[in-house]
Image (cartoon, rainbow, N blue to C red):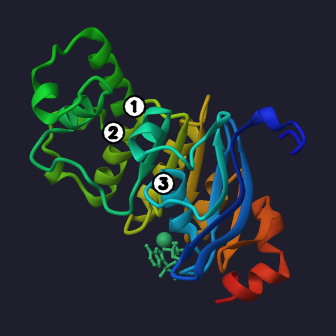
Amino acid sequence: MSDKNSVKDFVLSVEGLTVSFDGFKAVNDLSFYVEEGEIRVIIGPNGAGKTTVLDLICGKTKSTEGSIKFRGKELTKMTEHAIVHSGVGRKFQNPSIYEDLTVFENLELSFPRGRSVAGALFFRRDKEVLEAVEEVAETIFLHDQLHTTAGLLSHGQKQWLEIGMLLIQKPDLLMLDEPVAGMSVAERKRTAELLNRITKGRSVIVIEHDMQFVEDIAHRVTVMHQGKTLSEGSMERVKNDPKVIEVYLGH
Ligand code: ADP
Ligand code: MG
């Protein structure tokens, strides 16, 4: 990875980011930088401000101070919709898939041309859409389940489907909040494999507590505590940092 001076290499630059909820700073003067092709994992105790950081990047929450630059564009003043449109995809903790539709239909609906449920169901299943659906289904290990009703999938498969629904929109930055919570060990391994496959030309930010999973995916780790960066670097480095052991890993 290149050093921090080559600013143009950063897909995302977060600087001095602060949000105050009635005087309580959930995120407090936070700065971090993510490169293209990087998987960044954010860890830290409950209440550290991790989810709030994703809320700020995707525009769900507006910052009090600071800057979020994504491919040179300032996101802090953009609407949620415009942020999605500029190439930021965010997965929330609970899957929001259409349980009554098939895997195929869920992916097809998420293809960027499908604006609404009704509109999407009637647009032509042309070659481009079909190919995109098949490619994503392969990536998320659901190629054999394309015609399965989504409600019948396992919890892990539903999580993968939701990742697929984001992937089909080809985001340059993908953000996932605790994607392996509730998954079996085997599903966690496959999710790590999935994430390692999709970094070409994009960046991924993942919030996670499962340290084995973090080791399997993280290029760099940012440890948050009380809205600030407590430590940052390789997994090897942060897991041996006495401050991290004291406030997080030691518990
Ligand atoms: P984490 O994801 O690291 O567990 P969060 O980002 O969810 O932490 O929350 C950080 C802190 O900010 C918590 O104390 C939480 O209660 C508070 N918080 C988050 N969102 C809001 C909000 N919209 N209004 C008030 N307080 C909030
Ligand atoms: Mg959280």
The crowding category of the residue bearing disc 2, from other C-alpha atoms within 10 Å (few below 14, some 14 to 19, many at least 20), is many
* 182 shown above or below 126: below
Q: CA distance from mark 3 to mark 1?
A: 15 Å
Callouts 2 and 1 close, C-beta under 8 Å: yes
Neighbour class for label 3 at 10 Å: few (<14), some, many (≥20)? many
**Front residue of 177 and 251:** 177
Q: CA distance from mark 2 to mark 1?
A: 7 Å
Give the amino acid type for the residue marked by disc 1 in the picture. Answer: Gln
Q: Which residue is mark 3?
A: 176
Disc on the earlier residue, 2 or 3: 2
Farthest residue to the top: give it: 127
- Residue drawn at (12%, 44%) of the image: 149
Label 3 residue SS: strand
Left or right side of 150 for 191: right
Q: Position of residue 98 (x, y in %)?
A: 17, 47
Answer with the quarter of the image where residue 71 lies.
Answer: top right
Callout 3 touching callout 1 (CB < 8 Å): no
